[in-house]
Amino acid sequence: MSVVASPSTHRSWGPTYGIAASCRARHLVATLGGRFSLELGIDVDSGADEIERWALAATLFGNRISTSVALRTYRVLEHAGIRTISDAGGRDRKELVALLDEGGYARYDERTASRLVALAETIAHRYSGRLSVIGEQLVDVDELQRLLGALPGWGPVTVHAFLRELRGVWPGATVPLDHRASAAAHHLRLPLELEALSSLAAVAHLDLADLEAGLMRLCVCHDLAHCPGGEECPFVAFDREQFVHF
């Protein structure tokens, strides 16, 4: 993705970050993982079809439900041949409810099934069945968020979840750093400003979207309040299995 800068670009962005901070950033992503889209086998860098898949996954992330359940539910839908919101629109609502239940999405099954059907209808009517055309046409982040937020059930949480993994893919996907990522960055003594964090990602040879996702993962699976943080955070010696399941 284009957000990964070359060393020369990094020098123009701000101060050089120490080796320790770069190592913490790299260890974070290596241990907990980066973008949730990549964990699902979705490569948004490769084109519109993959962005359509990510839109379906982001819809599942938008509810107050654990990350693990959202990931599992997407895999259940994909196994059933439902890879995009448009695919979901072609299925019977009762079938969607059953698949959502199978993924563990029982708390929101009825509402989410209706939401998927409504989304598919709206996207078919407004965008000829391709949500990805929105980002191909818009470069203004406010307008982009407004149009996405006008989709049925797509509130600020869903819109942000969707756009943060499209940094460098869609010109308008320049949303602020998620507050959970900021909390984790503060905990690890990493930069809090998006531009500075982007500089650190470049130094650490990471994609900014992966680093932000790794920080979010840390926030939801580690007790930040009762940990000294920084280089003293025991996270640096932990394996993934030692973190709270999220």
Image (cartoon, rainbow, N blue to C red):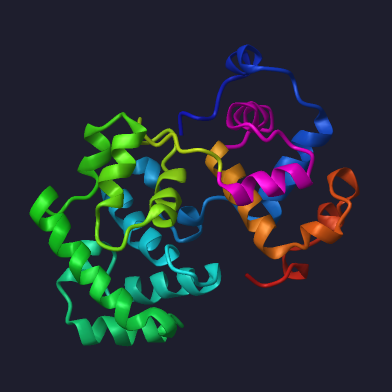
Above or below 207: residue 118:
below
Where on the picture, by quarter, is residue 177? top right
Q: Position of residue 61 (x, y in %)?
A: 44, 63
> Residue 183, position in %: x, y?
69, 48
Left or right of residue 141: residue 138: left
Residue 232 located within the stretch drawn in magenta: no
Which residue corresponds to the image point at 40% horizontal and 54% vertical from the top-left?
42
x%, y% of residue 198?
Answer: 60, 30
Can residue 47 be seen in the rendering of this structure?
Answer: no
Main SS class of the magenta portion in the image: helix
Q: Is residue 23 left or right of residue 75?
A: right
Query: Against 239, is 201 above or below?
Result: above
User: Which image quadrant is residue 90 in?
Assistant: bottom left
Residue depicted at x 42% and y 63%: 62
As displayed, is residue 78 above or below residue 208? below
Residue 202 colored in magenta in the image: yes
Quadrant for the C terminus, please: bottom right
Measuring 65% from the left and 44% from the top, which residue is drawn there? 182
Q: How many marks?
A: 0
- Residue at 44% from the left image edge and 58% from the top image edge: 41
- Residue 86 seen in the current view: yes
Q: Which residues are magenta?
A: 178-207
Q: Position of residue 97 (x, y in %)?
A: 30, 84
Along the viewing direction, whichever of 24 and 152 lies nearer the viewer: 152
